[in-house]
Image: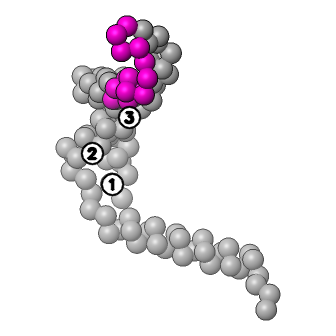
Amino acid sequence: MLIDTQTYADNVINETIVGKAQSLASMKPKSEAEAMATAKDFEAVFLTQMLTPIFENLPTDGPMGGGSGEKIFRSLMVQEYGKSLAESGGIGISDAVYREIMKLQEV
């Protein structure tokens, strides 16, 4: 038995689209506070990713002298820097993300 690959692909795509539409229809809209929190979280992750290369190249001398513990501490520290920057206004990404979230919920 030969399978028509185009028909199979069309069926898979249609099932996927229908599934996505049903899941979107069943989702409850976020409140404004939840949308803003999500936008700030996104900006914090973005800022953390932008700051990570800066801190990766700093020398590790002194009493700790590097090692895996310092790498873990440094990544946690950069993550907190990202959160702190996002909470104190960030670079404006959270406002744009918030507007997009609210716009997508207007459907």
Mark yes or no: residue 81 visible.
Answer: yes
Residue 96 screen position, x and y as percent: 37, 35
Q: Work out how far the residue at label 1 is from the one at label 2, CA to CA, in angstroms.
A: 10 Å
The reply to whether the magenta stretch includes residue 65 is: yes
Q: Quadrant of residue 45?
A: top left
The reply to whether the magenta stretch includes residue 82 is: no
Residue 92 screen position, x and y as percent: 35, 26
User: Disc 3, disc 1: CB below 8 Å?
Assistant: no
Q: Which residues are magenta?
A: 62-76
Q: Secondary structure at mark 2?
A: helix
User: Disc 1, disc 2: CB below 8 Å?
Assistant: yes
Residue 105's label in the rendered image is 1
Task: Specify the principal SS of the magenta part.
Answer: helix
Q: Is residue 60 left or right of residue 101?
A: right
Q: Secondary structure at mark 1?
A: loop
Classed neighbour count for the residue bearing mark 3: other residues with Cα under 10 Å, few (<14), some (14–19), many (≥20): some
| Between discs 1 and 2, the one toward the N terminus | 2
Residue 35's label in the rendered image is 2
Residue 45's label in the rendered image is 3
